[in-house]
Image (cartoon, helix red, strand yellow):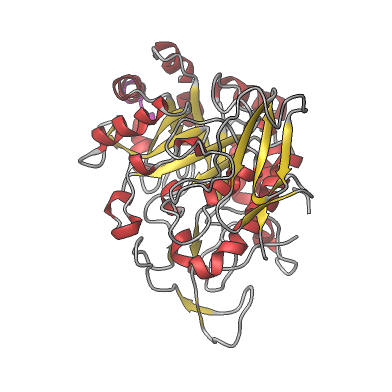
């Protein structure tokens, strides 16, 4: 999860070569093996009109894990940032009354290297931080911590910070033991938007053989959130996809490494357990102004970023719903291919950056989050608003792929667990789980595709 000042491609889906943590948290989306993490950003409350977003706008049925961004750091302690964070924490974690999920807090990582360096520089500072984390998690009822440091050992962070960061991570057991919720959710989010040479810090971090790196990760980290977005943007001077799955045929050198397939497999090939690697899926685009409007395509010259969108108000960055006419088919096709790739390679799942950048009102276009949900088959009974529909009904404007149970009889009686098309409704399907029928309805214009047992774009 990058910071609020991130740079941001309004380009069609990538094409291309090889390319979910199996969630073991009791009671969390147990009908699926994959994890879907959703980030919420506490500054989305300041966006106007239909962009205005607060914790109550989150659909808890979408995600296995919800992460609140950001917390602050002051005097080596984790703190609130916004004036209404405490009220937001209560609403954010109160969503667990509707659907079980893991709730984590994320200290701000972008532009805070000096703060983190100071915190790990002495044992006293280190201990003060850990004590504040324990108090913070208890007080506000979070299940754990998602830690982002951009970047250890570079960009102003001294080389020794790599080792000190590993020491910091080893205290997760103290945090877990002291937590009355008995949570061990403590994840490390790694930055992947760099070349191979820069990525090697993840190995140098421990200076250990691959087998020992794997053992370290298994012991101290629940998940590694790989930031497979912001790989390209308007700062480069030419248009490329924000989060391409594969490299473009003409890409050479470091650019050939800036794609989801390469980055995820680089982590896996160098000791990270595949089931703990979570790939980042953006719900926004980077935008470009072409130097020559008649010269279009990947890699052509640009003169800068497009003007800010009407809601997010940041030049070069448009939320998914701000680019509705262009992004709907492209974004969904891309997500479907990426999800299939992650499943085929036994990666742990996906993280959405961010849930408030999706079309959460259902006003503009089908929602990215519900599309990813469908791609990973995370269709579970849920008690949140709009989740239970009568057979044949359409989901509401704020509902995503959703459904209700018919009990132990009906269509699924005697049938094997799995997904089944509905003969009279391509916009829905039936999910059979232990003899119980759950009807799942897609957003308008998405259909159930029997060739892959997944949702797909309906062109007719």
> Is any part of residue 74 visible from this angle?
no
Q: Please state, as top left, top right, bottom left or bottom right, where the C terminus lies in the image.
A: bottom right
Q: Position of residue 246 (x, y in %)?
A: 70, 57
Question: Is the residue 13 above or below the residue 433 in the image?
Answer: below
Residue at 55% over, 52% down: 443
Q: Position of residue 330 (x, y in %)?
A: 61, 63
Residue at 61% over, 38% down: 439
Residue at 75% over, 67% down: 249
329 in magenta: no
Q: Nearer the viewer, residue 407 or 288?
A: 407
Snapshot quadrant of residue 202: top right
Q: Nearer the viewer, residue 259 or 459?
A: 459
Q: Main secondary structure of the magenta part?
A: helix
Snapshot quadrant of residue 401: top right
Q: Position of residue 150 (x, y in %)?
A: 45, 45
Snapshot quadrant of residue 50: bottom left
Q: Position of residue 274 (x, y in %)?
A: 69, 34
Question: Is the residue 355 above or below the residue 50 in the image?
Answer: above
> Is any part of residue 312 visible from this angle?
yes
Residue at 69% over, 60% down: 256
Q: Which residues are magenta?
A: 120-128
123 in magenta: yes
Say left or right for 202 vs 53.
right
Question: Is the residue 255 above or below the residue 113 in the image?
Answer: below
> How many labels sit on residues?
0
């Amino acid at each position: 999860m990058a910071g609020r000042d991130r740079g941001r491609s309004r380009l069609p889906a990538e094409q291309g070569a090889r390319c979910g943590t199996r969630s073991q948290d009791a009671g969390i989306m147990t009908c699926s093996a994959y994890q879907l993490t959703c980030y919420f950003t506490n500054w989305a409350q300041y966006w106007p009109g239909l962009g205005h977003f607060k914790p109550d706008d989150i659909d808890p049925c979408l995600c296995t894990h919800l992460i609140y961004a950001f917390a602050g750091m002051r005097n080596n302690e984790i703190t609130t940032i916004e004036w209404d964070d405490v009220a937001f924490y209560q609403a954010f974690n109160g969503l667990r009354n509707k659907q079980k999920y893991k709730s984590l807090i994320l200290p701000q990582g972008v532009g805070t290297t000096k703060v983190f360096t100071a915190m790990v520089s002495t044992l006293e500072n280190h201990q003060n931080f850990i004590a504040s984390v324990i108090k913070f998690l208890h007080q506000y009822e979070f299940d754990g911590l998602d830690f982002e440091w951009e970047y250890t050992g570079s960009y102003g962070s001294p080389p020794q910070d790599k080792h000190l960061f590993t020491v910091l991570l080893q205290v997760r057991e103290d945090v877990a033991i002291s937590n009355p919720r008995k949570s061990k959710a403590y994840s490390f989010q790694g930055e992947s938007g760099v070349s191979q040479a820069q990525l090697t810090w993840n190995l140098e971090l421990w200076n250990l053989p691959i087998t020992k790196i794997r053992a370290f990760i298994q012991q101290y980290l629940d998940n590694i959130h790989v930031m497979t977005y912001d790989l390209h943007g308007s700062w480069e001077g030419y248009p490329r996809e924000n989060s391409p799955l594969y490299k473009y045929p003409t890409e050479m050198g470091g650019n050939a490494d800036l794609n989801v397939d390469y980055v995820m497999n680089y982590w896996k090939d160098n000791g990270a357990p595949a089931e703990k690697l979570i790939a980042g899926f953006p719900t926004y685009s980077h935008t470009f102004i072409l130097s020559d409007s008649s010269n279009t395509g990947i890699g052509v010259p640009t003169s800068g970023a497009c003007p800010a969108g009407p809601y997010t108000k940041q030049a070069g960055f448009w939320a998914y719903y701000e680019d509705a006419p262009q992004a709907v088919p492209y974004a969904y096709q891309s997500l479907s291919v990426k999800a299939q790739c992650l499943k085929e390679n036994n990666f742990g799942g996906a993280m959405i950056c961010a849930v408030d950048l999706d079309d959460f009102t259902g006003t503009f276009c089908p929602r990215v989050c519900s599309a990813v949900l469908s791609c990973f088959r995370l269709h579970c009974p849920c008690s949140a608003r709009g989740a239970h529909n009568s057979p044949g009904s359409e989901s509401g404007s704020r509902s995503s792929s959703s459904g209700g149970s018919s009990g132990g009889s009906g269509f699924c009686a005697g049938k094997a667990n799995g997904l089944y098309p509905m003969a009279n409704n391509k916009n829905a399907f039936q999910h059979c789980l232990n003899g119980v029928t759950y009807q799942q309805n897609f957003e308008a214009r998405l259909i159930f595709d029997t060739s892959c047992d997944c949702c797909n774009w309906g062109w007719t």
